[in-house]
Amino acid sequence: MEIQTEINSKRENPSLLGMFMNPSEQFQRIKEKPKIWVPLIIVSSLYAIGMALMAFSMDASVFIKSGVSKDQAGVFLGFMKVTVVVLGIFSPIIIVLITSAIHLLIAKFTSSSVSFKQLFSMNTFILMISAIGLILNMAIRQAIGGNPEIYLTSLAGLLNQDKSGYLGSIEVFRIWSTILTAIGLHRTAQFSKGLAWTIAIVFFLIGIGFGLIGTSFQSAPKL
């Protein structure tokens, strides 16, 4: 009976909500029974909701401050809102695709036999954390106002910064996703713990690097 129960548990589908309660178990399920389409549709839908909330938090003042007339600012704002929502639908697919391809390339140089499907499923489930973080932050921004580009769960939000910069990259849900990436690469891809954590941290530092580049551009003198 115990053996049958263990076999049944191994055949259970991974759960997106399980990523919050028992991620290690979900990674094991992903390894044995990777799922892609339904989780990807759910995560993309959540991202679209979060980006829609971000779009509703935008106003034309940003364009007006840049010297755009009020009439043109309204047109630009409408176009920007549509673009943001569309990005919310397709960005998860692009993010998971690129991340999984990089992970698979690394796997080719190790003894890991992980498949692209397993990695794609794993990264889709991890992205659930970011989707919830996006919705939470944008919902709060919708309620209290402020710059929607700055997550309240980031250091930039905590320190009440006017611009995101590299402090915006140091954020609770991003750190959470980094930890899950390390666990997932170890559990699902069978990477060593050292390699898994190294890859996850490097990806996190790259995010901070992009934040530093953004800060440099923002602080550069305007001609």
Image: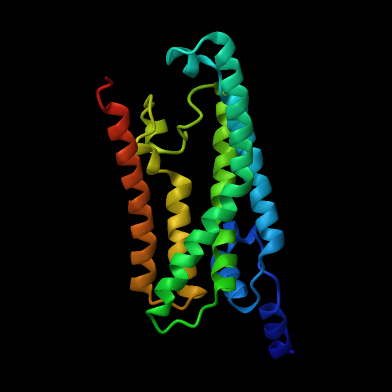
Query: Does 29 sit above or below residue 70?
Result: below
Looking at the image, which residue is at 69% across and 53% down?
A: 42
Q: Residue furthest top?
A: 70
Looking at the image, which residue is at 35% across and 72% down?
A: 195
Work out whether residue 87 or residue 51 is closer to the camera in this orientation and state it.
87
Rendered-image quadrant of the N terminus: bottom right
| Image spot of residue 201 (x, y percent) | 35, 59
Q: Quadrant of residue 9?
A: bottom right
Residue 128 visible, this orientation: no
Work out whether residue 82 or residue 30 is closer to the camera in this orientation and state it.
82
Rendered-image quadrant of the C terminus: top left
Query: Does 41 sit above or below residue 211?
Result: below
| Image spot of residue 88 (x, y percent) | 60, 42
Looking at the image, which residue is at 33% across and 52% down?
A: 205
Residue 172 visible, this orientation: yes
| Image spot of residue 114 (x, y percent) | 51, 78
Query: Does 80 sit above or below residue 27?
Result: above
